Amino acid sequence: MLKSNKEKTIDPCDQVPESIVQAITKKVVATQQEEMKKLQEAQAASMIQTFAEMLSEVTKRSLINHGVPDVMIKSLKADIEEFFQLPLEEKKAYA
């Protein structure tokens, strides 16, 4: 007599030891967390870059014919550029 399809079906999870399932689950979760962190860091970096570009544009337009010495402007620009080259964690210290 032929077995029914239900009797032939084997759930693979029933044959995998719980310790293996837990190890795989932990690895998947850790990988997802790492990917999320990378995504968040990339988004933050992108936002900072956009802000830096906007600030640069505003600064260029705002600092024309104002009476502030060129030396001071160049120093400020260098400081701003240096700040935006810092790693994200160092920038956060200024927040």
Image: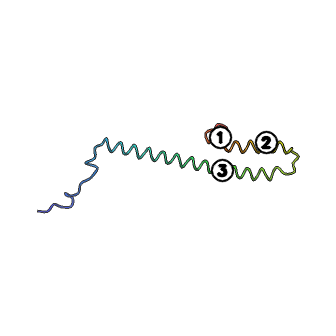
Query: Measured from the top left, where is residue 41 in percent x and y?
Result: 57, 46
Q: What is the number of the mark on residue 75?
A: 2
Q: Quadrant of the C terminus?
A: top right
Q: Position of residue 88 (x, y in %)?
A: 62, 42
Name the residue rendered at 70%, 52% in the picture: 53
Q: Which residue corresponds to the image point at 21% horizontal and 61% vertical from the top-left?
A: 5
Between marks 2 and 1, how big is the CA–CA gap? 19 Å
The residue type indicated by label 2 comes to Ser
On residue 49, the disc is: 3
Q: Nearer the viewer, mark 2 or mark 1?
A: 2
Badge count: 3
12 shown above or below 23: below
- The secondary structure type at the circle numbered 1 is helix
**CB atoms of marks 2 and 3 within 8 Å:** no
Q: Earlier in the sequence, mark 2 or mark 1?
A: 2
Read off the residue under disc 1: 91
Q: Nearer the viewer, residue 76 or 37?
A: 76
